[in-house]
Image (cartoon, grey):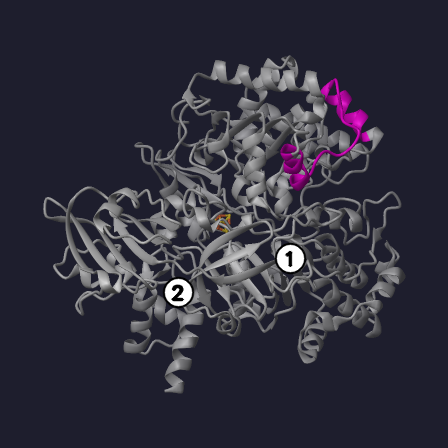
Amino acid sequence: MKDLSACTTRSTCPYCGVGCGVLLQPDGAGGLTVTGDPDHPANQGRLCSKGSALAETVGLSQRLLAPVVAGEETGWDDALQLVADRFRDTIAEHGPDSVAFYVSGQLLTEDYYVANKLMKGFIGSANIDTNSRLCMASTVAGHKRAFGTDTVPGTYEDLDEADLVVLVGSNLAWCHPVLYQRLMAARQARGTRIIVIDPRRTASCDSADLHLPLAAGSDVALFNHLLTQIDAGGLVDADFLTHTTGIHEALDSALADDVSVTGLDTDDIAQFCQMWMETEKVVTIFSQGVNQSSAGSDKVNAILNCHLATGRIGKPGCGPLSVTGQPNAMGGREVGGLANMLACHLDIENADHRAAVRDFWSAPAMPEAPGLKAVDLFRAVGDGRVKALWVIHTNPVVSMPEADAVRDAIAACPFTVVSDITALTDTARLADVLLPAAAWAEKDGTVTNSDRTISRQRSVLPAPGQARADWDILAEVGRRMGWASAFDYQTPGEIFREYATLSGIAAKFGRDFDISGLSDLDAVGYDALQPTRWPVTATRQGGRFFADGQFYHPDGKARLLPVTWRAPAAKTEPRYPFWLNTGRLRDQWHTMTRTGLSARLSAHLPEPFLDIHPDDARATGINPADLVQVASPHGTSVLRARITSDVTQGQVFAPIHWTGETAPAARIDAVVAAATDPVSGQPESKASVVSVTRFDAKWYGFAVSDREMRPSCEYWAQTPTKLGYRAELAGMDTIDDWQTAARDLFGLPEAQITIVEDPARGMARLAFYEDGRLVAALFISPEPVAVMRDYLATLPQVPDLLSGWAPADRPDPGPVLCSCFDVGVNTILTAIETKGLMTVEAIGEALQAGTNCGSCRPELASLLASAHQKEAAQ
Ligand code: SF4
């Protein structure tokens, strides 16, 4: 580990579960320089586009700087006393289960620990759940059923040694880009083969040897078939099976399943089985496509069954590897952030475990049963069983399924507290009390990534205004509720030591999560803690689990589970003929409260969209760039149509990121049904039944401005640019006076206006000038507006601006593809054509694109392939 200069601090990226190390250098003026930490084992210096843009998200715009009660700024004393009083009074009147916390995988482990201790040990309810319920609860359930514990067996190093990597329901190239780059490096070095199993063709398919676009939710049938082939091929590892039970039951179930429900070509299925069976070193990476399913737990166990049957687990280069979406989803799992767990992998239903934790905490009231999981929790808010709710660092009004019902439930809740870094979220707008929390670069604590590595997140910027750390806010409420000594924490290091000590007690019950070797870290040791993979005990540090055949069920054996394919929600009503799949984009994170602040991240895909197959588009009369309305029994969402064979017929795909703040009509989770996995409680986000129809607006608009707009028409989507903002607009009412509408309906500046109009054709083009300088422009059309958006977003000071087209000497760069170097699609296509570029590396040499974080390399490869295909066809 290299020494750093005095002004450089090691920390961790706050976005995804890869858990990349970063080096932070404050500039002394509130800003930062962020680079990858070459010494961090997760990323060895690499960062993806989101991590590379972290410095652009630490400014104070949109920050919540003081507590707010009933819309009025106030001091901490009043706000926290109100929170403590209302929670205490509600509990006194209605019992402990009348209150709930809904927290987040964005919390640090120390924050999580205090929240969990307050709710489960002192309030006496288990009604604390986390948005990680939406992320990987099915993996937790699958791991526990198979291993007797929620343990990720392998490590990232396995990717360096594997000969075959199978990505199941994982667009690793976009959602865990640094791991994907690691896989690409291994492929380059040793020819690692890759199979992608995903209903959708994603960026991860570009380097795959085989893509299996299976029917939504049919993963269990595919892996059951693999298990039968493993058995038929004599590949069951008889020695390893002595460490397991259930092979016969699992095989019986597998044989009863019908692989044809996957809809896959039989040759492709055979090739998949052949590749898997002939390769000893196989890693199966699975993510949200497996977890976010009403059969998620069974999918996980179907995968684990194959690894257990062959003994391909916990050894170098082989095993199942779940990758989490959030930076500290794993920390939340370990510390008891889910409603059905105690801390340190102890079980809430186990009386001995409960007693041990109660004694350790000197807790007055421990719940004996699991609390409400996320979907049920918000239903309980809606029907009045939960009367006081505290939401911490998450935005359920956007991210929960049946989001409109969640919005209505929170709006009607008698008392809602929201802790966040901004008041500008759909959920924060409904809060009775808003508490200003410290943000990523201001927080101190630990996180655990997807391969069990605990890393320090270190504070390098002062918390602005009155913002405070979450553990500090929670502890203060605990003290004000009457538990002064239990919550008398002064530093996150104290909390970590207490947690590590508790893990030693858990280990005495035979639990695997044991970091008791860190329980005597002093303040200096905590501050200097290096990335450390658990367990950490006097005799062991890190490594893989289970290769020795030692599992955590009472008999020490693993379980192969009999699982059977179940269809996701059936398309029983003809008016809902599509399955809606939702997911993440390369350059955005969650509900964009941070990545949405970066103009270059926002330039990649600036508008919410729906991918629909060409045949389905034809059948429904949808043309490219039309607006479409997606509807289900739960709500509607309006999105821009992208017609593409990346999705199969009968399926559509939409990203999850847009909110009431950025595109109010496009909140996709308003449409998603809250169907949950019966074991994990995780909602199905990949297969809701929906209809898709053209959204026939009276008019369509595109606007750019040097300042934020405030549109109030039926459809709008606004995103930042380097010089201001751009917005897509559409409306249902006839408008005669566009100059007035520009001001009153879209929030464009009051300025000197040049207008070109053709009322008969419904066309209008307006340019707005201040002191002769262009500050905004508006283009209106009865059809989706056809102008060069990326060129116009530069607010070009040219006389023929209202043509909407770039002059020949100033070409339109097109949508940004490489966000590190701001290189657009048109620029790349022109270079491919004019310079005869043949490889991604050649594009890099010519334009720099793809040479920094590498996140765009799959898209560059795809663009290159389609350009060459087009050329060959001519
Ligand atoms: S892969 Fe990207 S988003 Fe994930 S931790 Fe690393 S830099 Fe952050």
Image-based side of 380 in relation to 248, left or right: left
Of pointers 1 and 2, the one earlier in the residue sequence: 1
Asked whether residue 722 is drawn in magenta, I would say no
- Under tag 2, what secondary structure? loop
Disc 2 residue type (three-letter): Ala
Amino acid type at image mark 1: Phe
* Cα–Cα gap, marks 1 and 2: 33 Å
Of helix, strand and loop, which mostly describes the magenta segment?
helix
Q: Nearer the viewer, residue 525 or 496?
A: 496
Q: Can residue 538 be seen by looking at this rendering?
A: no
Is 10 situated left or right of 598 in this image?
A: right
For disc 2, the neighbor class at 10 Å (few under 14, some 14 to 19, many from 20) is some
Which residues lie in the magenta part?
A: 353-382
Q: Position of residue 783 (x, y in %)?
A: 33, 64
From the viewer's side, name the closer residue of 388 and 27. 388
Q: Reply above or below: 154 against 471.
A: below
What is the quadrant of residue 695 in the picture?
A: bottom left
Q: Is residue 732 left or right of residue 185?
A: left
| Residue 9 pos. (x, y %) | 43, 36
Report whether the residue tagged 2 is closer than 8 Å to ligand 1.
no
Q: Going by the image, does 854 lie left or right of 102?
A: left
Q: Residue at x 84, y 29 (%)?
A: 352
Q: Which mark is residue 286?
A: 1
- Tell me the residue that label 2 is attached to: 625
User: In the rendered image, which quarter is residue 573 located in?
Assistant: bottom right
Instruction: Identify whether 65 is placed above or below 226.
Output: above
